Amino acid sequence: MSTIWKVLTRKKEIDTESVEETRLSRVLGTFDLTALGVGSTLGVGIYVLAGKVALTAGPSVILSFLIAAIASVFAGLCYAEFGARTPKTGSAYVYTYVCVGEFVAFVIGWNLILEYVIGSASVARGLCLYLDTLLNNTLENTFKEIAPINVSFMSEYFDFMAFGISIVLAIALAFGLKESSLVNNIFTSLNIGIVLFVIIAGSLKGRKRL
């Protein structure tokens, strides 16, 4: 039993030479990494869920966002500490492997895969919902006729648009890190611009009294 426990809790040791040596191209700068972090945090969810949160929480939505921001800051500080302690590719998987053990790292690694799959699918679906709204629900009506899904816990139809967006983004990633980073920088800058526009326009044109 002790042997199994040692196997499950054995930790990965990283020396200085292994940190310096890497087969990956280091092409990302400070702006690229910042845009990558902002793009991962400020996604489609702010457009899809912000209205529902405001409807449910009311004026307390500001407090809700403040609490979420504080939690995000602490999470970011933890990742910064882990990144400084373990400057190796692999994100939370490697951090856990070095600090906690192999079994926990195995679980977290698979959780990360599920997280990215579900997150990417949610972003693609949210984008399609907004595009479909501009098209007067034409896509939804068409997909319901072509590929309906008669399962209670799943969507009513197969979203070909979301599937196509996921494939296009996967192909963009296959071109290389530098090219995909450029695309991410463009979309992140556009995203920040839209958010700032909504904040400024809401501050100037919003009704002060209900």
Image: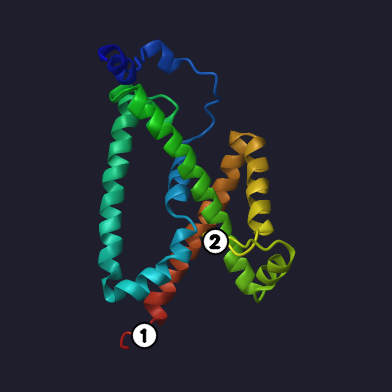
Q: In the displayed structure, does residue 95 sit left or right of residue 158?
A: left
For residue 30, say whether it is visible: no
Q: Quadrant of the C terminus?
A: bottom left
Question: What residue would you read off at disc 2?
Answer: 126
Residue 204 vertical placement versus 193 (above, below): below
Q: In the displayed structure, does residue 55 sit left or right of residue 2?
A: right
Q: Nearer the viewer, residue 69 or 195?
A: 69
Point out the tag, 2 or 1, that comes first from the N-terminus.
2
Q: Label 1's element?
A: loop
Q: How many marks?
A: 2
Mark 1 belongs to which amino acid? Arg
Q: Nearer the viewer, mark 2 or mark 1?
A: 2
Q: In the displayed structure, does residue 48 sit left or right of residue 210?
A: right
Give me the residue at 36% from left, 85% from top. 207
Q: Nearer the viewer, residue 104 or 120?
A: 104
Q: CA distance from mark 2 to mark 1?
A: 28 Å
Give me the residue at 28% from left, 18% from top. 5
Q: Nearer the viewer, residue 76 or 125?
A: 125
Mark 2 belongs to which amino acid? Gly
Numbered tag placed on residue 207 in the rendering: 1
